[in-house]
Amino acid sequence: MEMKSHTGDNHSHDDKPKGYNKVMDWKVGVIPLPVYLVLAIIVLIAAYTNQLPTDMIGGFAVIMVIGVLLGDVGQRIPYFNSIGGPAILSLFVPSVLVFYNTLSSTTLEAVDQLMTSSGSNFLYFYIACLVVGSILGMNRTVLIQGFIRMFIPLVTGTIAAVTVGTLVGMLFGYSAHHAFFYIVVPIIAGGIGEGILPLSAGYAGILGGGAGEYVSQLIPAAIIGNVCAIIIAGLMKKLGEKRPELAGHDKLVRSEKGDKVLEAAKHNTNKSIDFSLMGAGLLVAMSLFVLGRVVEHWIHVFAGFTLSGAIIMIIAATIIKSGNLLPEKLQTGAQQLYKFVSTAFTWPLMVGLGIVFIPLEDVASVFTIGFAVTCMSVVIAMATTGYFVGKLMKMYPVEACIVTACHSGLGGTGDVAILSASGRMALMPFAQISTRLGGAATVIGATALMHFFS
């Protein structure tokens, strides 16, 4: 039966005052400005009256409110948005707020519970969804070729970064020892948790003192290097838009299948969203993450060394995809989950990372022009080498540069920021390999060299 409007009905959207419609058209992200302000005020009042839940609910409320705003502002600023503006703002504005003690204690506790506690650990949830979903959504040929070919740009980029960074540091008055061990190595060590912390423990064991003394010396270089990598990723995105032939648009390797691969990718992208399949994709992603943790423990117990659970998760997902061991519907569900998580949570996640993992006071304590230029030279050498070597390896140079630059990021934190600045979150599996394997090799090699030269 056809429904007809009552003659006197003045409540439809079209009949509302023009001023109302105009105001509702102003948006923060996808949220109408008046609605956003109401939601933000609710969270703000709760935070500063100590009524904010100090759990994942409170944590999500805080990072979503701030992340939606900063991501939107960063995208609106001309030129700044071309060098990763949303990522830079989302990471560093919250860090500045922490530095000046602007955020309430309940806010900090809620975000910390969400980001780092064993009960939440939102960062690893995010990475698991992106890694598994992007791998299962890739073309199998491109996936395998990408993993095989990326090692050469990664290795040559690391050699270039070490050489250039050490020489530039010496030009600014640092000793070769200090430039290498305290500036270059922290940048390419794989982040704070899996790079800086084991490095500091290794340095303390060799040189004496507490590990905490070395953490504050190593973190600043890693943070500045990560900012530089974000900017390079943003510039690569711009280059890819101006020179489409240099960019694969989420593809790392130039496939011989060419248009067939692109058509398959478009077909997967255009599939209708199935929420039940997304739920199944979530189960697949979480199960593979758990598998990585279990196998990591077994390897440590029975083989005596540690292999990151994230790497094991990547290997498992790659085997499943290359062997087509999972029904296509479940692969589609994992891919759709990845698209949802990357779209909805990237800027909020970086807000949480900025609050918890970016200590500006450490950077301020050692910052000089020479220090900053040395850090920049490390990342520029790494990324430039990745660009040209990747091109020789029949990889898309824009994507090869971005993935190689992830080796100079803050671990999973850096990968998210760098890939979001470049608009290429589908490269997360390659970024994780670059960061974690490259970082692990750096920590082992640097600790051995420190022992030799001490």
Image (spheres, helix red, strand yellow):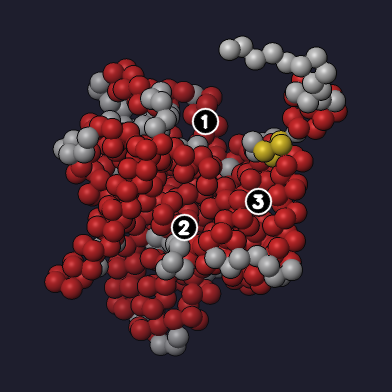
Label 3 neighbour load within 10 Å: few <14, some 14-19, many 20+: many
Amino acid under label 2? Phe
- Say which quarter of the image contains residue 265: top left
Residue 20 visible to the viewer: yes
In whole angstroms, how far apart are the C-alphas of marks 2 and 3?
16 Å
Which residue is painted at 25% across and 22% down in the image?
256
In the rendered image, the vertical position of residue 402 relative to residue 191, given as above or below: above
| Residue that carries the numbered disc 3 in the rendered image | 65
Circle on res. 239 = 1
Taking depth in this image into account, of 356 and 177 the one nearest to the observer is 356
Amino acid under label 1? Leu
Amino acid under label 3? Val
Farthest residue toward the front?
1
In the rendered image, the vertical position of residue 114 relative to residue 15, given as above or below: below
* First along the sequence among labels 2 and 3: 3
Which residue is painted at 50% across and 62% down in the image?
115
* x, y percent for residue 84: 58, 43
